[in-house]
Structures are given as structure tokens and as C-alpha cells.
Image (cartoon, grey):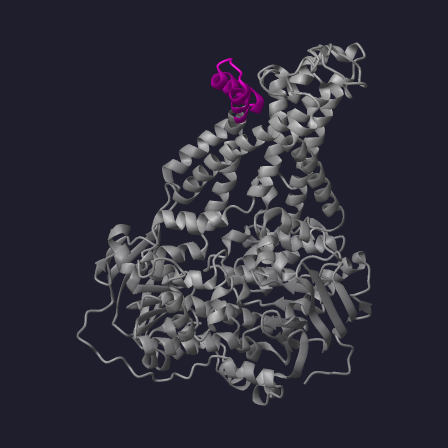
Amino acid sequence: MIDKIATPAVDIRDLDVTFATDGGDVHAVRDVSLQVAPGEVLAIVGESGSGKTVTARTILGLNPETANIGGAVFLGADDVVSISASRMRELRGTRVAMIFQEPSTALNPVFTVGWQLAEGMRAHGNVSKQQARRRAVEMLKKVGIDDAARRVNDYPHQFSGGQKQRIVIAMALTLEPDVIIADEPTTALDVTVQAEILELLRDLRAEFGTAIVLITHNMGVVADLADRVAVMYNGQVVETAPVRELFANPQHPYTQKLLAAVPRLDIADRPQVKPSKDAPVVSAKDLVIDYPGRLGRKPFRAVDNVSFDIMPGEVLGLVGESGSGKTTIGRAIAGLTRVTDGSLDVLGVEMHGVRERTFRPHRKDLGFVFQDPATSFNPLLTIAQCVAEPLVVHGVAKNPAEARGRVDELMEAVQLPKEYGDRYPHELSGGQRQRASLARAIALDPKLLIADEPTSALDVSVQARVLELFGEVQERFGFATLFITHDLAVVDMLAHRIVVLHHGEIAEEGHTADVLGNPQNDYTRRLLHSLPVPDPVEQAARRARGPLASA
Amino acid sequence: MRVRKLLGRLPVVHQFRQSIGLQRGMLVAGLVITGIFLLMAVFAPLIAPYGFNQLVDENGDTFGAQVPPGGDHILGTTVGGYDVLSRVIWGAQTAFFVIIVAVSLSIFVGVILGLISGYLGGWIDRVLVVIADAVYAFPTLLLAIVAGIVISQGQSSQIGGVFAAAISITVVFIPQYFRVIRAEAVRVKAEAFVESAKVVGASTPRVMFRHVFRNSTRTLPLIFTLNSSEAILTLAALGFLGFGIEPTSAAEWGYDLNRSRSDVTSGIWWTSVFPGSAIVLLVLGITLIGESLNDLADPRLRARRRAADATPADAVAATQPTAREELGEVPR
């Protein structure tokens, strides 16, 4: 398919990168050799800390000059590792460009997008203002920004996240580089937007013939876009193969493990909870939540007229993209956000206009697992002290030392060694921390657990284990769960019922198998279709079938 | 193992281990200079040949005014007939006394107010911030003079004089601690572990002191040292302007400098040079500690064994607000 004989666009030879840190030297990349042919999409996959980003940044010479770099990285005839800084500047933009992960921080908020697009051109040659502007408009059109001639004068905040990423892509492409480094280009975006961006990247590759080095941990994105895949583990490339071959027949044990861990939409039919006569744990009726606007501005309506119930022992998946109001609902149930209108009954307490003093005694029946395990523990307390906190607060134990027995039990329940209780949060990995977080949430044997995107900050292989544990613990303790997530594959693994939110309203509600297997609502269908399948053959077939009517 | 770990977490010890090259040199120089003055202060009764307000030796003979260095008076005597060396040594005691009282008072009040203001927010926050800003806007020395007059009522015993100086410095410093702690509290308040504590059902004081407070204090050692040197300067300035401590109550460098003004033109150098250099050296020592602590606290300024930065951990650290910016200074 790709002419391997042509000079590669990027040729990495025996790359070796070491950083000196406070904690000693970190050997981030060991002996990596990779070639990227012109027009080829090479995906580098691996967990956080596997060295994939360092490798890609070396191509741009973005690693600090003082980091110890061995080996060679050829961009055409230039060895990036040894050339001068001024030559490197010439190469950036013209030969190699970068698309960043977070489009909202990659653009400078005080300049118009047109100015920022033109800046690259001005840096690399004598272009007049009009020429630069014309080119900027042209590039914006190419990346699918409507009404480009007018919008070129707009500032970054006037664009949506997906549009911003399109502009970042336009910036990377203005000088028609041979290679684009795309570092997690869709991670910060919603699934439906991600699908559009992937589509755009594919089209642009066809049009410009640019080689793309794609760094991602999302196997669905890899299956959708990549021609060839390099799997990195612990600073080394453990396997390189064409994408179909890799998915069909992974050779290295790590690759096999990684692929096995990827959550897939199987539409598993989980046994449904027997309908019981008990009162629901949570009951929302016509729930409305506004965020107050600035002085003189209208408040922002995050949740609009939402009604749902969570029955005892049931796992309800609350699915939606960013801005759908899913997190707001979770926070309102936990009493962290005020209810504006309607009724929200949590554990028998009406949350509309509730006083913290009234609700506090009921907090022992409510557990919360936060999204980011890195920040949800007090860094100055040991894990055991953190887990003991609810026990101490509700008077079950006088101090953390007295609660230690119960803490050890809890640690065992979430499959953490007891000794980890004496460690500080930063001494645990993300997955371990999230398990400790679960232990803290179930410390008082709650009737309701709220999990707000508990696995989205974790690596794929870790995520699978945490989800499995989640299911086990839920079945063992039998608490009701509100599982908030943007990932349909994750809800599929856990939830009995699903509520799909769209712009603060319920788009669809029903049993997991029904909603995912036979979606009735247009939005749900689009959501499902946008989710890239971690299988290149099937993804290609899906793509060939074309987008759904509304996509 | 446990003890070493704990030792490594202590403010200055931790930074000392982290430091390297010039920064370690600065830190060590600062520690040595400050250490010498501290020893001088503690052992003043043993080291100093005479008392700070002594005018006659054991035979009942007066020292005499403006005696040049040498003989019985190694550094000479002042215009008032005091022994310069003794005054300099005893002065260290006064200086440290004032530092301790001033800084501990202002830390205590500033931290509590900052925590309440930052964590609770609302109208109380707005009022406190306005007051703190108003105090900030005032010329420091003027404020200290006014406070000094109000507190001492023109009297000046040792305790009274020291407290007058210390409290007037406190008034000026409270807003600094207030601001830093408030900024930290506002930042920490938004962290997930604080929300987590709220969800668990912890009471507001518990959240404030167990979770927010302990995570808001990381810049305190730094401001502490920087403020200490400022406290000495303010004390010296008060003394120089005549609002300080009387020579009979305690030895104070600023006062001695004031009295030696007329000596300078008549070629009597020893009365001004020694107290003057004592001020300069102690301020230099403490500032060196403060500056190197500041550099070490900031990953972007910290030198490393092999010059290399921007590891993933540093990238994170670099995005966190740094001590210097919290002090209201603009990065150079």
C-alpha cells in the first residue's frame, strides 16, 4: 500500500532519551527505531509514561536541549538531535508541525485566529498581510470552518472545542509540512466531535499527502485512522505492525493484554434488577439546575426538566457529552450544587432548598468516587487516614487509628494490600488510588454510590480492572449506583439502565441492552455511531456505510 | 528510616538536600550568617564584655564617650559612652526578639483570617480583602510609626519598646500572610479532596483545618524569612527615626546609628560602622536563606545536578502557582 522504498518522512534511529529529575535519572525512551513513510499514518500507542510523547516531541526538538538525547532523528537530511536551534526553527512549520491535545490552550486567547494562522507564515518567509490573510481564509475553509472570510477575525473563545481543534490543525497545515505530530488530538473532545476531527484528518492526509504521527491511547482512534501501529511499553517499542495485522494477530504479550483490556460495546444483557416495591433511592422530578450568570446575564441552565429514578441495588448509567449536565446532576444529588426548581429526592430528603445541616446525617448513606484520583485525596494524609475519614466524621471511630481494622477490611474488599494504608496518596498509582477512593466511598456501607467518570483518567488496561472491581463490589454490597460517564462502552459493562443526556435534557432512557442495541433517539444513534470500534476492519466497513442521516 | 523521612520533610532541611551549586552556596552562607547572629543573641550575656546600658566598669570608672577602638573597648565607645561591641552583641538579641514576636503575631492572625476569608468567601472575604489592600497601600514605615506611637504612648520600657516595635511591624505584615494564605485556600478549596471531605459529611471547621489549612502552608517558611529581614529593617528605621527603644531599655542598632550621625563628619567611624554592618549582615543572611528557599521552591528556578528540566513532574509543578507570584511579584 505504501511505498517503503521512498525516503521516509521521519527516520528515528536508536533514539535514547534520559531526564535528570529530583528523584534520579529517568530513562524515558530506550533504543527506539521507527520510520514513517510519506503520507503514512503511524500510531504510537502505550500507557502514560511509556515514552510515546517524549519520542514524538523529540521529532520537533521540543524536549529541553539539556535532556540527554542519544541516537538520531532524521527529517529528510537533517538530524534533529544534532542540528542548531535556528535550523530547527526553520524546520518547524515547514517540515514538521504539531497538533496539541488541548485546543483551548494551544491557541492564544488575545489574538484573532487569522493573526495566529498568519504568524507561522510570517515567521517563515516574506508574505504580505493580504497574502497571509488570503491563505488563512483558505486554510480555514479547508478544515471546514463555515463562513471563513468573516470568522478569520474572531478570537479563539468564539469557537467551540471542535472548531478550535480544526483551527489548530489548519495552523499545522498552513506551510504544508511533510509530517504532523498529533499528540492525543481528540482526547479532549466529545465522541461526536472526535468522529468529525478524525474524518477531517483522513481527508487532509489524502489531499496534502502529509505523514501523521498519531499519539494516542484510544484503540478506537487507532483503528479508525492509522496505517501502522507501534506499541510502546516502558520506553521501548515492543511491536510494530500494520494496523489490521496488529488487531487481528498481536504478537507481543503486552499488546495482547492491551487489546484485551479495551472496552468494547458487546451489548451484554445484564440481569435486570427485580422490580421492587421499595421506594427509589433517588427520585428526580422535573429537575432544573441553573448556574447563576454574571451580573446582568441570564443564568445558564445546565439541567432542564429531567426526571428519573434510581431503585435500590440498581446501577444507573448517566451518559452524555461535555455540557450535557451529567456531572451537575451527580453533584446535586451529593448536595454540592443547589437545585433551582423541580424536585430531587435523595434518600428521603428533598434537596430543593435543603440546608446542609438537615442533609449531613444522611451523608453516611452516600458515597462519592471522583474523576481524578490524583486530586481526590488529601496529599498530607496517609491512605488509611483518608479512608478512615468518613468513619471518624460520623462517629463510628474516634480517630483514624481506631478505624484501622475496618480500613484494612475495606482495603481488602478493593483488593489493595493492607500495607498500602501507610502510604501517602502520591505513592500509589492512578488505578490503586481509584480503588482506595472506592474503599473510602463504601466505608459506611452506603445505600447510594455516585461515581463521576471514575475511570476516564486511567490507562486502558488499568481501567478494565477498576471497572471489573467496581462491578464485583457493587454486587457484593448491593448499593445503588449512579455511574456518570461519557464512554458508552463503560456503561455497557456495568449499568442495568441508561439515561442519555443531551444539552441538559433526557434524550433517551431505558434498559442498557435496549438503549445500546436498539436506540430510538437520533442523538443516541449518532453517539453510538461516532464511537470508533477498536477493530480496523469493522471500522472501515462502518465508515464505508457512511454517516447516519444527522451526523 | 522514619526519622530520616520526617527530617527530610522539614522546611530548611528538605531544601538543603535539594539544593546544588550556587543555590546551595547561597543557602549555606545565609544559614551560617544567621546562625552566628543567633548564637550571639542567645549567648549575649556570656560573650558581651559589658551590659548594653553599662556606662562604668567594675572599678567605677566611666568608659568615656567616643573612645577609639582598642584597649578595654575593642570596638570603641559611643557618644553616649556605651561600649560599641556590647551594644552590637546585645542588639542581636533585640533583633531576634522583635522578629519572633512580630512574625509569630502576624502569622497567627494573618493565617486565621486568610483561611476564613479564602474558604468561606462571601461578604466576609470581600471586607477583609478591602481592609488588607488598604493597609497594603499605606506607606509601611508611616504605619509602623503611627502604630508605635499608639502602642507605646511615648513610653519605652524594654518589653514595651520591643512590643511596640513588634506590633507595629505586625500590622504591616498581617496583610501579606493574609493574602498568601487566602490565595492558597481559594486554590485548595476547589480541589477534589475538599469536595470529597464535604461529601463525606465533615463539618466546616474540620474541612478548613484538617484539609485546607495543612495544604495551604507550603509558602510560609519562605515569607517568614523574607519578612524577618524586613522586620529588622523596619525596627532599625523606627530606631533611627527615634520611635524605637531607649538605650537604657535594650540595645538597638537603629538607635545607635541615629546617635552616631554627627560622629561621621568628625571622623569617628566606629560608632556607625559596626551597628550598621550588623544590620546589613543579618538582613543579608536572612534574605539569602529566603531567596534560595524561593528559588528551590520553584522548579523553573531550581538548578539540578545535571542541568535538565521539564520532566513530566516538573511540567505539572511549573503550572502550579509559584511562591514568588503569590507574593505579588512579577516574574523577571
| Figure disc tally | 0
Q: Position of residue A344 (x, y in %)?
A: 25, 60
| Residue at the limit of the structure toward the bottom, as seen here | A249
> Does the segment drawn in magenta span residue B162?
yes
| Residue at the limit of the structure toward the left, as seen here | A277
User: In which quarter of the view is residue A523 placed?
Assistant: bottom left
Of the pair A386 and B179, the residue shown nearer to us: A386
Split into 4 quadrants, where in the image is the N terminus of chain A? bottom right
Q: Is residue B331 above or below residue A237?
A: above
Q: Position of residue A232 (x, y in %)?
A: 64, 76
Split into 4 quadrants, where in the image is the C terminus of chain A? bottom left
Of the pair A449 and A420, the residue shown nearer to us: A420
Please give the name of the residue rendered at 63% of the width and 21% of the height, measured from the top-left corner.
B251
Q: Main secondary structure of the magenta part?
A: helix
Q: Which residues are magenta?
A: B139-166
Instruction: Judge whether residue A441 can be spotted in this image.
Output: yes
Please give the name of the residue rendered at 48% of the width and 17% of the height, measured from the top-left corner.
B150
Of the pair A490 and B264, the residue shown nearer to us: B264
| Residue at the limit of the structure toward the front, as seen here | B59
Instruction: Judge whether residue A328 can be spotted in this image.
Output: no
Of the pair B316 and A272, the residue shown nearer to us: B316
Please give the name of the residue rendered at 47% of the width and 77% of the height, measured from the top-left corner.
A465
Q: Is residue B319 left or right of residue B29?
A: left
Q: Is residue B254 above or below residue B62?
A: below
Q: Position of residue A426 (x, y in %)?
A: 54, 62
> Does the segment drawn in magenta span residue A481?
no
Q: Position of residue A364 (x, y in %)?
A: 30, 62
User: In which quarter of the view is residue B84 placed?
Assistant: top right
Q: Is residue B10 left or right of residue A431?
A: right
